[in-house]
Image (cartoon, rainbow, N blue to C red):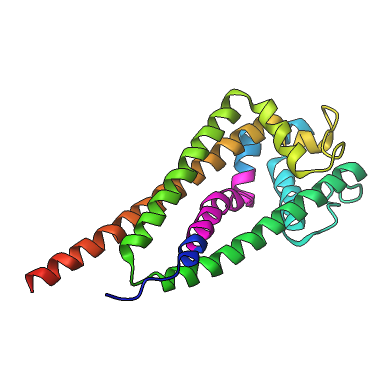
């Protein structure tokens, strides 16, 4: 029997899996195609009285600024920034949060790969960890998703109070930032993010089940031989 990996290895593997399941799906939604689809769904171009191509161009620049800590000075008319100073400041805060979470994902990928390698000779243990973590994160995502679906305004407010400084994220109705990303946009996006987490959890659970069963099949083959 191969030596058992130390218990912290299992903990690191589980924690890294939890981080990846929770963050990868939602972060992947920060892409021009998904955002454009939701903006079209909620008639953002009509609200600005421009075509969708103009909205896509501005939004694409803002998404790039989120990824690379840009100035958020994208413009519809080519001269005046669409967002005012307070909106640009909030988007800078959003950029910092997104880039920090991306860094956490990168670390989790490395730690997860290393701990998975150290657990490779213990498929049953590895599978149990994967199933347990996936089940916990999936259940939590469903619960939080229900909260967002049933009490979106409260959940949205709590999220912003947790991650952004007070007074920096509230804007008057009709501001350009709210018009570009209206509340129904975020309602849909939050539900899709929840679904992405649940799907990720399901995939991890299925792989974990396969790993868990593989050890039993190996034992059966050894007994036959």
Q: Residue at x 58, y 23 (%)?
A: 150
Magenta run includes residue 29 = yes
Q: Is the C terminus in the top left, top right, bottom left or bottom right quadrant? A: bottom left
* Residue 159 seen in render: yes
Q: Is the N terminus in the top left, top right, bottom left or bottom right quadrant? A: bottom left
Query: Which is nearer the eye, 87 or 83?
Result: 87
Q: Is residue 160 above or below residue 92?
A: above
Q: Residue 120, how many percent across, how many down? A: 37, 71
Query: Which is nearer the eye, 77 or 118?
Result: 118
In the figure, is residue 204 to the left or right of 84?
A: left
Q: Residue 89, how many percent across, how many down? A: 87, 47
Question: Which range is magenta?
Answer: 13-35
Q: Is residue 95 above or below residue 151?
A: below
* Residue 84 seen in render: no
Q: Quadrant of residue 101?
A: bottom right
Magenta run includes residue 17 = yes
Q: Residue 210, how many percent across, how many down? A: 29, 58
């Amino acid at each position: 029997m191969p030596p058992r990996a130390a218990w912290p290895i299992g903990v690191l593997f589980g924690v890294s899996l939890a981080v990846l399941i929770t963050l990868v799906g939602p972060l992947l939604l920060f892409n021009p195609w998904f955002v454009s689809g939701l903006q079209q769904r909620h008639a953002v171009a009509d609200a600005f009285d421009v075509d969708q191509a103009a909205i896509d161009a501005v939004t694409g620049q803002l998404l790039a600024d989120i990824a690379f800590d840009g100035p958020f000075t994208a413009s519809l008319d080519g001269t005046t920034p669409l967002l005012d100073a307070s909106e640009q400041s909030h988007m800078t805060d959003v950029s910092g949060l997104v880039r920090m979470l991306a860094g956490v994902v990168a670390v989790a990928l490395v730690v997860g790969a290393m701990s998975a390698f150290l657990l490779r000779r213990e498929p049953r243990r590895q599978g149990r960890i994967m199933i347990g973590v996936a089940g916990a994160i999936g259940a939590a995502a469903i619960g939080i998703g229900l909260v967002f679906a049933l009490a979106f305004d409260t959940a949205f407010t709590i999220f912003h109070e947790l991650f952004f400084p007070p007074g920096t994220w509230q804007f008057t109705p009709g501001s350009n930032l709210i018009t570009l990303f209206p509340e129904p946009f975020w309602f849909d996006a939050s539900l899709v993010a929840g679904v992405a987490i649940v799907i990720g959890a399901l995939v991890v659970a299925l792989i974990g089940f396969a790993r868990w069963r593989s050890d039993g099949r190996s034992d059966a083959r050894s007994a036959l031989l």
